[in-house]
Amino acid sequence: MTNHSHDVDPDTEKIEIALLLEGIFRKYGHDFRRYSYSTMRRRVWHRIHLEGLPTVSALLEKVLHDGVLFHRLLRDLVIPVTEMFRDPDMFLSFRRNVVPILREIPYVRIWHAGCSTGEEAYSMAVLLHEEGLLDKTRIYATDISEDALSRAKEGFIPIDRMKLYTKNYQASGGLASFSDYYVAEHGLVMLKPSLRKNIVFARHNLVTDRSFNEFHVILCRNVMIYFDGELRDRVHGLFHESLASGGFLTVGSKESITFTSRSGCYDAFDDRNRIYRKNP
């Protein structure tokens, strides 16, 4: 298929994409205006080719008048990339170094921001169950995508990922057998409902929504890599406001708080695994 995007004047294309993102915000309330331009451009053109359209402007016209097409585009813009016990070393460090501190707290609140289809929140539930902390913990798992959240609530795991997830679980310091946490039947794998009882799945938009509680741990991993610097700073402000004194913030392996306006507000508790502790 011809890549029309190569034939467009780059300045014109920037205007078109800015108008598209502005239109999406005004019509549907989803704010992608401060997301990384290169990421948005790539995902927008992916949808343009699938729809057989010639330009970004043609996509904008369709999106404003066709809610079904908008939801197809939305799925492209919030592509969920997640797995159980992703970056196992982080979970191992959390288990060894953060859990002993959480034991001292009467009731623990954890926020998984940008939880996608829920794998990370379920991973945390498994870890806390094994450490005897799940019953005194409430996990809030939030995402911008209703589709991702409805899948998260169902608790299904793609059967072709079980080998990877089992390997991740073992490398993260798992104390049991990963198969203890799911049931498999008719080619489907479902996480045991007991893991879900202390997880609240809810829609929350990091770009436009406010803080909604005080947390002892916030995990936002591999979400802010899609934001521009100004938006990243704003979201870090939200997290700082939402964290209890001495609380923990964990970001993705390719992310850091070093170059944000909040870098002086945290100690590098485990910099290699991107676990930071809010200064008292």
Image (tube, rainbow, N blue to C red):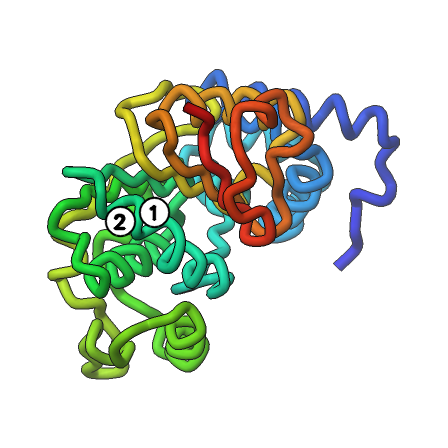
Q: Quadrant of the N terminus?
A: bottom right
Query: Disc 2 designates what residue?
Result: 150
The foreground one among 186 and 156 is: 156
Numbered circle sitting on residue 147: 1
- Taking the spot 38% from the left edge, 78% from the top edge, the residue there is 166
- Taking the spot 69% from the left edge, 45% from the top edge, the residue there is 42
The foreground one among 132 and 49 is: 132
Q: Quick check: 21 above or below 99? A: above
Disc 2 to disc 1, how far (Cα)? Answer: 5 Å
The foreground one among 156 and 170 is: 170
- Taking the spot 16% from the left edge, 38% from the top edge, the residue there is 107
Tell me residue 216's x, y (percent): 31, 35
Q: Quick check: 103 above or below 260? A: below
Residue type at numbered disc 2:
Ser
CB-based contact (under 8 Å), mark 2 and mark 1: yes
Residue 24 in view of the camera: no
